[in-house]
Amino acid sequence: LRMIVREVLDNGLRLITESMPHVRSVTIGVWLTRGSRHEPEERSGIAHFVEHMLFKGSDSRTAEDIAQAIDSIGGQLDAFTAKEYASYYIKVLDEHLPLAVDLLADIVLHPAFAPDEIEREKKVILEEIKMVEDTPDDLVHELFTQHFWEGHPLGRPILGSKETVEALTQDALRSYFKGAYVGSNIIVAAAGNIEHAQVRDLVGKAFAELPATGEPLNGTPPSISPQVVTRIKELEQSHVCLGTACYPQKHDDRYVSYILNTVLGGSMSSRLFQNVREKRGLAYSVFSGISSYRDAGNLTIYAGCANDAVEEVVGLCMEELRTLKREPVPEAELKRAKDHLKGSLMLSLENTASRMSHLARQEIYFERHFGLDETLAGVEAVTAEDVQRVANELFSGRACAAMVAGGPVPDVQDHLALE
């Protein structure tokens, strides 16, 4: 039996554990409920920069010490920064859990922020920013998001810009760190061959000096500005991203939107894949996806196609959206979408790392845990009428479009009306 236990420690740190007695590994992660959307504009990219700096040495360990400590137990240490959270996690054999907790606490509580390391890391992150420019499918999503939520922190790139990254100082990093890395913003999630009491003792000791509160934050939801933006690059292929608003994380119709997305472009039997790629061979890659945050979300379609096919591809994609508004999804297709969604959900929860992040994300957005059965029931309950209703709710007005075009600028304006 899987046991999930949630406990709040005295300093506000939330600890969630799931015991999976049939495995030998443990993944434990420290999650910070702060990400790029919580930064002031002039310090854009600071959350991601701090994440890089935590691996560059603590007060008692050099970057090399950290790497060796992990390597000597065959563990994997990783981290990432998103728009609403950041995460640092270690996967180890169950017997090495004490060292894993010790290491995580050290890098998250005592970063050195050495000036020479800061300057070196700036170069690394500037290269990372250039890489996005050179990866057209990443770039087109970035352009889309920036224009869809223009002027709002959710629209800004997680990496920041060349200017904001170059301007970061040791003082700025320290003060951001001090305000953000506090008990009320921290969740520790662990999954694997563990017992809650053992993890609580380790975490309670290791994080004992974590301050309870930092600076409070009030963000406002973004408003949407549908527009078409094009970047011309010398490319063999054009990249297109189209999108509309979708629901925030906690919305009652979230399961309906997942099914809608699966039918539209979330699987290989989806309408976009079949109609744009398989039947007409117009796009090498075409799919749709949902991004959802605390107070906003969007549904986007991505297509990579020949330069002269952009208008046709956009027209076909938009037609699929209008069809979903007009006609209920046939029963067999609906069932296929449900089975696809349930199957991929269950497969995604097979290892300790994915379970650990599942626990943490549920805590971040819902402050409670949903059992798998509850989620599967939510998917199962979706009807064809629900899908049509939600399509009509989401696909209204005009779609927003971003393109990284390899040829002359395609004119897609006429295709974007959803009514």
Image (tube, rainbow, N blue to C red):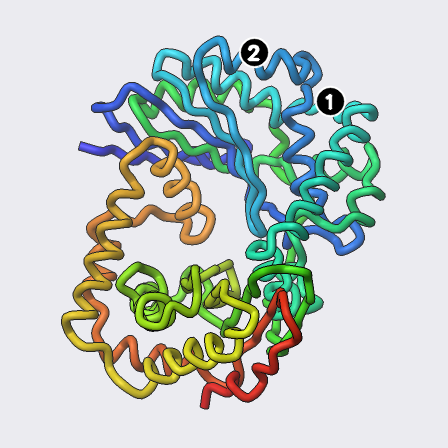
- Residue 165 lies in quadrant: top right
Helix, strand or loop status at disc 2: helix
Residue at the extreme left: 332
Residue at (39, 30) in percent of width and height: 190
Q: Residue at x 41, y 39 (%)?
A: 357
Farthest residue in the bottom direction?
Answer: 419
Mark 1 Cα-neighbour bin, 10 Å: few <14, some 14–19, many ≥20: many
Residue type highlighted by circle 2: Gln
Q: What amino acid is found at the position of numbered circle 1 in the picture?
A: Ala
- Left or right of 106? Residue 49 is right
Residue 39 on image: x %, y %: 70, 51
* Left or right of 227, for residue 102: left
Residue 140 position within the rendered picture, expressed as x and y whole percent measured from the top left: 59, 61
Residue nearest the observer in this picture, 270 or 256: 270
- Towards the viewer: 250 or 209: 250
Q: Residue furthest top?
A: 72
Number of numbered discs? 2
Give the residue displayed 33% in from the left and 21% down from the top: 25
Q: Position of residue 276 (x, y in %)?
A: 38, 71
Mark earlier in primary sequence (2, 1): 2
- Residue of label 2: 68
In the picture, residue 358 is in which quadrant? top left
Q: Which residue is mark 1?
A: 112
Say which quarter of the image contains residue 74.
top left
Q: Is residue 73 above or below residue 214?
A: above
Along the line of sight, the residue nearer the viewer: 257 or 218: 257
